[in-house]
Image (cartoon, grey):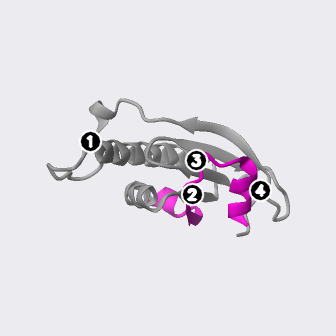
Amino acid sequence: MLLPHKALVVVADGVHAKFFRNAGQEGKIQLSAEGELKPHHLMDDGPAGIVPKDTPPREINEATFAKQLANELYHRAHAGDFNALVLIADPQSLGEIRRSLHKEVQSRMIGEIHKTLTKASLADIEKALH
């Protein structure tokens, strides 16, 4: 994957997300950590869409966090924080996040990787991007 300079890389799962920025030049990948997002006010916020009554609380919380992450990405995109985005998440979380993404964020996505890397080293995340 050709990762542009200053591209935003988000590594997420159902309970938190880490943000990285590509500091590499000329097609090289050199990520630097840029913070994280953890679930907040899950009981007050709720997931996007209709939730069946028998949905386990853990799944509701993960869907709510996916919506919170999608909102954070929208605010960053709207503020001009990134022009290129790569999402890395386990398949279920990626599906939840993708469902909530605004078109402004979708238009900046250059890739997605279906892997659980939230506890991986920076070197392993960079390797997954190659």
Amino acid type, label 1: Pro
Q: Nearer the viewer, mark 1 or mark 4?
A: 1
Residue carrying label 2: 88
**Residue 118 is covered by the magenta coloring:** yes
Query: Mark 2 touching mark 1, by CB under 8 A?
Result: no
Q: Position of residue 24 (x, y in %)?
A: 82, 55
Q: Residue at x 51, y 56 (%)?
A: 105
Q: Earlier in the sequence, mark 2 or mark 3?
A: 2
Packing grade of label 2 (10 A; few <14, some 14-19, many >=20) is many
Q: Position of residue 19 (x, y in %)?
A: 62, 44
Q: Say if residue 101 shows up in the picture.
A: no
Left or right for 19, reference 127: left
Q: Which residue is mark 4?
A: 5
Q: Please name the amino acid that badge 2 sits on.
A: Ile
- Compared to residue 31, the image places residue 112 above or below, namely below
Q: Nearer the viewer, residue 83 or 8?
A: 8
- Residue 121: x and y, percent? 70, 47
Q: Are marks 2 and 3 in contact (CB under 8 Å)?
A: no
Question: Looking at the image, is mark 2 or mark 1 nearer the viewer?
Answer: 1
Residue that extends furthest to the left in the rendered view of this protein: 53
If you read the primary sequence from the N terminus, does the residue marked by circle 1 or circle 4 appear first? Answer: 4
Q: Amino acid at mark 3?
A: Thr
Kind of element beneath mark 1: helix
Marks 2 and 1, how far apart in space?
A: 24 Å
Q: Which residues are magenta?
A: 103-130
| Residue closer to the observer: 73 or 97 | 97
The residue that label 3 is drawn on is: 118
